[in-house]
Amino acid sequence: MLSHLYIENYALIEKLDINLSSGFSVITGETGAGKSIIIGAVSLILGQRADTAVLLNKSTKCIVEGSFDISKIMLNDFFASNELDNENPCILRREITPNGKSRAFINDTPVNLMQLKEIGERLVDIHSQHNALTLNNSEFQMAVVDNMAGNSELLKQYTQEFRLYQELKHELADLKEKEKLANTNRDYLQFLFDELDNAALKAEEEEEITKELELQNNAEEIKTALFKTIATISQSEINVLAQLNELQSQISKIVTYHPQIKEIAVRLQSCIIELKDIGNEAETIEEKVNFDAAMLEQLTQRLDLIYRLEKKHSVNTVTELIEIYNKISDELLLIASFEDKILVTEKLLQQQYNKVKEISTTLCQKRKQIIPTIETTIKDILFNLGMETAVLKIALSETDAFSTNGINDVIFLFNANKGGELRELSKVISGGELSRLMLAIKSIISKQNMLPTVIFDEIDSGVSGDIAGKVGLIMKKMAADMQLIAITHLPQIAAKADVHYFVTKQTDDKRTLSLIKQLNGEEKIIEIAKMLSNENVTISAMENAKELMRN
């Protein structure tokens, strides 16, 4: 429960520091005094977004802090999963700075708004008169049914499995689309692959072919030059080797006469050896160089093929062609794998469909089972609220397709008059009836949720007199299991409260502020008397107020 509330610099509130009680509390005050402003401040510590417009003094920060007694609720999972200290009381704080920055804290540890909202949803349920319109919303109606059926954990499981089912559906559709597109290109890719595969390309062959072609095209010139070299060195009538040998013979006769002549002889011998080696190598090369017209044609065709493929694929080397060949090969393998992937995904999708179907069927069964109980309970509460002939019928239909709610759609049908036609809420229900119906629903789901605190912001709109007293009794009954705080303008409801807070508006020359105080017994009687007699506190009004409080 919310045991203490501190508000500073929020809207019309300069500073508010108040302890709150368990049971049934009411907040009253004149219109515009700031009753709903307090609820707005509480919403901040429950994760609602805010901006600098809420600052009373634009030069200093706004602070809202609430202390919650959490001794009777289990929040261990929340604190553990968010790595927060589990302390009692649990203190939620929100700060809004003049520059628009917002900070949130749980037990003095900084948290984000999602964490604040998560714990807030397990601590407080705030319902305003405007929220009654959500009763016409099919999502809210389904939430009511699931809440009463205890489907919370099952819905979490369904949401997880349904999300996976949708992902698999998208994946399968994507695979089929890719396969369709790939099949469009398959024949062309296969043609390119076969062409490159038949070419049997090798990384260095273009350079090797170019060199071999140059040799073949110049074979005659090469052989002529080599033959002339060989002849000059050793085979002509007057050849270089013969002359060098003659010189060697002459020099060898005079080597003893001069020391440097011996060196000349050695050098001549080296020249003879080198020339013989040159001649032998030239002979070897000359024998190997032979013009081959067939080879020339073959090499020319091969080089033309390489050039054509390079031009076709817009590359400059055989290495790049081989890379393209490997890439096309991978693409063809991928195309071939689509069929297997599609089969596997279809199998997984069918398995996931079965899971989702099983859970959604269980959800449907639990909803069907609880609906009669909801209808009967609501009918009894409405009877006590003066709607003796009112009937709420919950129409649950089944669909073939899965949705976020499973395989069901729900519509609340209503009629307040005996024998009247049941129609959708928005078409047949008045404002006062809507408020009472929402109160009836809130009274049963709040108990089901085991929320420690429920706040009603003028949920009694559209009711008065004896019915207002009955609304107060239902709130009083609800407060036996939780803390219930109601903002009201009805004395019949205020009289049923255990604790009564009064909000006033104070105006001076510079500004208007909202103030709140807890009324004692006599003050409570006077305030209710004012509510009964339009501020004119008569003896009769005082007696009426006492009578309301006794009853």
Image (cartoon, rainbow, N blue to C red):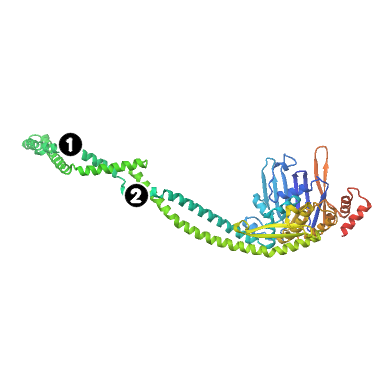
Identify whether 138 is placed above or below 52. below
Q: Which residue is mark 1?
A: 221
Residue 356's image quarter?
A: bottom right
Q: Nearer the viewer, residue 394 or 172?
A: 394
The count of marks equals 2
The residue tagged with tag 2: helix, strand or loop?
helix
* Residue in the picture at 34% in, 49% down: 194
Three-letter code, disc 1: Glu
> Where does residue 340 sit, x and y in percent of width and height?
45, 57
Chain-order first, disc 1 or disc 2? 2
Residue 105 x, y percent position in the rendering? 67, 50
Tag nearer the camera, 1 or 2:
2
Q: Name the residue: 22% across, 40% down.
A: 215
Q: Is residue 88 visible?
A: no
What is the three-letter code of the residue carrying label 2? Asp
**Screen quadrant of the C terminus:** bottom right
Quadrant of the image occupied by residue 206: top left
> In which image quadrant can residue 163 be found?
bottom right
Q: Is residue 413 left or right of residue 335?
A: right
> In this figure, which residue is indicated by the disc labeled 2?
194
Residue at the outermost right position:
539
Quadrant into which the N terminus falls: bottom right
Q: Residues within 10 Å of mark 1 (few under 14, many from 20)?
A: few
Q: At 58% from the left edge and 62% from the top edge, which residue is drawn?
A: 357
| Spot occupied by residue 276 in the image (x, y as percentages of width and height) | 13, 41
